């Protein structure tokens, strides 16, 4: 039984009164039980599932669910894909969790790690052997190996290629019937970061079609293949094949950089680490950016007043990128951090070995940090901070690249199509069926004629 805490939202992103339609009696009881439970500090995540929130990967109302979670406490007992954990629901609490010295990403600290169901999205993340789950000196060693790919200098050199690719995608959109719906997630938000990360990593052109077919399913932009453990395994094996082939064909790309570094430092970067790092950057390096661009387009086409601020020059496009990151984070929930010893956070005691889930989308709309209008999309709000790229040592290495891609994509799209309009209501768009990503499976629009 899924925890259902759904509130309808209008196209402006404002919360409507709680909707009772679609809640059966048992679901409604579960919601009430969760809110009537003792304070979070008096509970543990291993209590009976009926007293905890069960996170639904397919919920149509992620932000309404998160509103309920925030109301329940700063750290709330949840079940995520069968895993009992604590959910860090509020901005300040999440910031503490991301930087606390007694919380670690190393899976060896997870007391119940052998009880986690295999093959889930959570399982794929927590068992990753790249820098994602490393700490301390090990993390610094692995991160330093790839940091050169994301320097300001390399991104400046990459920018003209991103702009040229964006221009080609705009030309392709302009060739489509202007009065027929076009899925901008599939036709625009996805191919741009996919091609950019392929260029940055160094994927040979001969392999790109097959690799893109596999990664399309991971990013949920193509229904021809299901995102399954077997498909993920095929994707990883194919990437490994590409990396092996690139040993003898060096270029100006990340794969070449890593091989050269491995030779230079005497093999401190193992073959397994090298492969895991490239796989991480290829998948994580574009899937979340797809969500960012999709969410930004969705927010702006339903808020003409906000779009006018951009087109008039009163607000820069990077303000729309940052507000989207806050208001509709590309990542919903991200696993895990584990208590390395008994610790108390915001009055909630965590026992050694208990996992904590990071609730990025929830923290972005926390009224305790952003004020009573946190639920509103407003690119004119005073510049602030958000946690959508994380914080501390694990801050997203690709954040500057994602920001650049999104800013270029939005500027080009809304400059090219002045009459662009939504072709579906927000509530009619199916969400991604995953706890990790926060976006919709499609983003249908009517482009209208291209600007002259």
Image (spheres, rainbow, N blue to C red):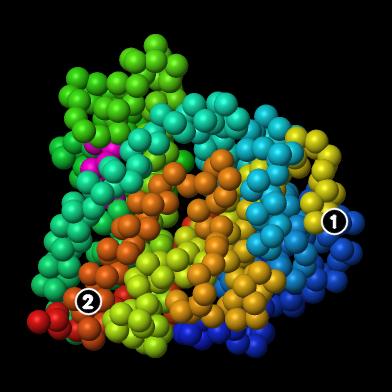
Give the x, y percent position of residue 236.
38, 34
- Verify whether residue 192 appears in magenta: no
Give the x, y percent position of residue 407.
32, 64
The circle drawn on residue 347 is 1
Give the x, y percent position of residue 306.
40, 83
- Verify whether residue 199 appears in magenta: yes
Which numbered disc flags the more N-terminal residue, 2 or 1?
1
Image-based side of 370 in relation to 143, left or right? right
| Other residues around mark 2 within 10 Å, as few (<14) / some (14–19) / many (≥20) | some
Image-based side of 322 in relation to 423, left or right? right
Which region is colored magenta? Answer: 194-202
Can you say whether 180 is above or below 172 in the image? Answer: below
Give the x, y percent position of residue 164.
15, 57
Helix, strand or loop status at disc 2: helix
Q: Which residue is drawn at 40% across and 20% down?
A: 271
The circle drawn on residue 438 is none
Image-based side of 212 in relation to 97, left or right? left
View extreme (top): residue: 266
Say whether residue 115 is visible. Answer: no
Residue 361, image quadrant: bottom right
The circle drawn on residue 415 is 2
Q: Residue at x 34, y 26 (%)?
A: 258
Q: Residue at x 21, y 33 (%)?
A: 252
**Most foreground residue, 16 or 49:** 16
Helix, strand or loop status at disc 1: loop
Q: How far apart are marks 2 and 1 (CA)?
A: 49 Å
């Amino acid at each position: 039984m899924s925890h259902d805490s759904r509130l309808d939202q209008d196209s402006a992103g404002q919360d409507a009164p709680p909707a009772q339609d679609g809640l059966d009696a048992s679901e409604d009881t579960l919601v009430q039980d969760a809110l009537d439970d003792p304070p979070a500090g008096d509970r543990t995540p291993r209590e009976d599932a009926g007293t905890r929130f069960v996170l639904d990967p397919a919920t149509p109302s992620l932000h309404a669910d998160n509103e309920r979670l925030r109301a329940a406490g700063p750290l709330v007992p949840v079940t995520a894909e069968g895993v009992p954990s604590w959910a860090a629901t509020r901005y300040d609490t999440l910031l503490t969790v991301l930087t606390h010295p007694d919380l670690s990403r190393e899976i060896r600290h997870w007391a119940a790690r052998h009880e986690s169901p295999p093959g889930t999205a959570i399982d794929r993340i927590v068992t990753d052997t790249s820098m994602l789950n490393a700490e301390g000196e090990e993390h610094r060693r692995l991160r330093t190996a790839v940091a050169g790919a994301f320097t300001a200098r390399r991104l400046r050199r990459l920018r003209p290629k991103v702009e040229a690719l964006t221009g080609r995608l705009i030309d392709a959109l302009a060739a489509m019937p202007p009065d027929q719906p076009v899925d901008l997630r599939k036709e625009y938000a996805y191919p741009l970061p996919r091609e950019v990360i392929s260029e940055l990593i160094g994927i040979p052109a001969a392999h790109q079609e097959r690799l893109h077919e596999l990664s399309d399913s991971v990013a949920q932009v193509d229904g021809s293949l299901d995102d399954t453990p077997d498909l993920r395994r095929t994707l990883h094996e194919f990437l490994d094949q590409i990396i092996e082939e690139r040993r003898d064909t060096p270029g100006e790309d990340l794969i070449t950089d890593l091989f050269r570094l491995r030779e230079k430092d005497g093999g401190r970067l193992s073959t397994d680490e090298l492969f895991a790092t490239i796989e991480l950057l290829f998948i994580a390096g574009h899937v979340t950016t797809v969500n960012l661009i999709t969410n930004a387009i969705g927010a702006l086409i339903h808020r003409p007043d906000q779009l006018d601020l951009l087109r008039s020059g009163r607000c820069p496009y990077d303000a729309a990128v940052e507000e989207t990151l806050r208001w509709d984070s590309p990542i919903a929930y991200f696993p895990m951090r584990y208590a390395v010893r008994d610790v108390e956070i915001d009055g909630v005691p965590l026992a050694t070995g208990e996992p904590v889930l990071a609730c990025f989308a929830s923290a972005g709309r926390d009224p305790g940090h952003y004020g009573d209008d946190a639920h509103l999309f407003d690119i004119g709000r005073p510049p602030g901070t958000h946690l959508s790229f994380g914080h501390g040592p694990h801050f997203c290495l690709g954040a500057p690249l994602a920001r650049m891609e999104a800013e270029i994509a939005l500027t080009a799209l809304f400059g090219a199509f002045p009459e662009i309009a939504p072709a579906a209501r927000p509530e009619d768009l199916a969400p991604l069926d995953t706890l990790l990503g926060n976006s919709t499976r499609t983003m249908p629009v009517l482009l209208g004629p291209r600007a002259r």
